[in-house]
Amino acid sequence: MTLKDTYKKEIAAKLQKDLGCKNIMEVPKLEKVVLNMGIGTYIRSGNKDYSVLQEHLALISGQAPVVKNAKKAISNFKLRAGMPVGLTVTLRGDNMYNFLEKLVNIVLPRVRDFRGISSKSFDSEGNYNFGIKEHTIFPEVPQDDVVKNHGLQITVKTTAKSADAGRALLTEMGFPFTK
């Protein structure tokens, strides 16, 4: 059974009871997952071709990333307007649930000395942000192509009204938070 089916059949009913929601539509649910990868240091180190990172992020997420360019020049960072600074992917629907299921069950346990992810990274609206230091922990990334390890920021956007409701949702979905 997939994470989406589990949410619809079991998790939503349990959250409705635990959070005291009168209507099933009040129960928090996932809206989207956003993956971000900064490539500014990669570009500044002399590599103009960042297509390898695009391919890796496409393999990780299952869809093509969008290249984000600098809006204005900042001389202290050796940044010019229009220079590529990041890659981003927004996952919704089935892709989002498939990615989260893979992340929780396969990818995070592969991290060396993994003790869980911080439960303090919720904002006031119940959204969760965390980072991964190496994008190579995903099994889809071919280890031969990796020139330099890159970090990955993952944002999980929920419809929760508070951090506690968002934490309850992600805990029920199997996120391995530290105790």
Image: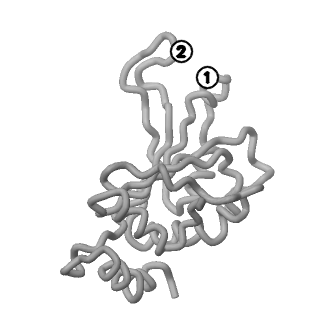
Q: Describe the element under mark 2 as helix, strand or loop.
A: loop
Mark 1 nearby-residue class (10 Å; few <14, some 14–19, many ≥20): few
In the foreground, 145 or 14 = 14
Q: Is residue 36 left or right of residue 136?
A: left
Which of the two discs, 2 and 1, labels the residue nearer the N terminus? 1
Distance between mark 2 and mark 1 Cα atoms:
8 Å
Q: Amino acid at mark 2?
A: Lys
Location of residue 80 in the rendering, given as x and y in whole percent from the top left corner: 46, 18
Location of residue 72 in the rendering, given as x and y in whole percent from the top left corner: 37, 20
- What residue is shown with label 2? 78
Location of residue 149 in the rendering, given as x and y in whole percent from the top left corner: 70, 42
Mark number, residue 174: none
Q: Are marks 2 and 1 in contact (CB under 8 Å)?
A: yes
Quadrant in which residue 60 is drawn: bottom right
Q: Is residue 41 above or below residue 67?
A: above
Q: Is residue 50 above or below residue 19?
A: above
Q: Amino acid at mark 1?
A: Arg
In the foreground, 45 or 167 = 167
Q: Residue at x 52, y 67 (%)?
A: 100
Q: Describe the element under mark 1 as helix, strand or loop.
A: helix
- The extreme left residue here reads 22
Q: Residue at x 36, y 25 (%)?
A: 71
- What residue is shown with label 1? 44
Work out which quarter of the rendered image holds the C terminus and state it: bottom right
Location of residue 59 in the rendering, given as x and y in whole percent from the top left corner: 60, 59
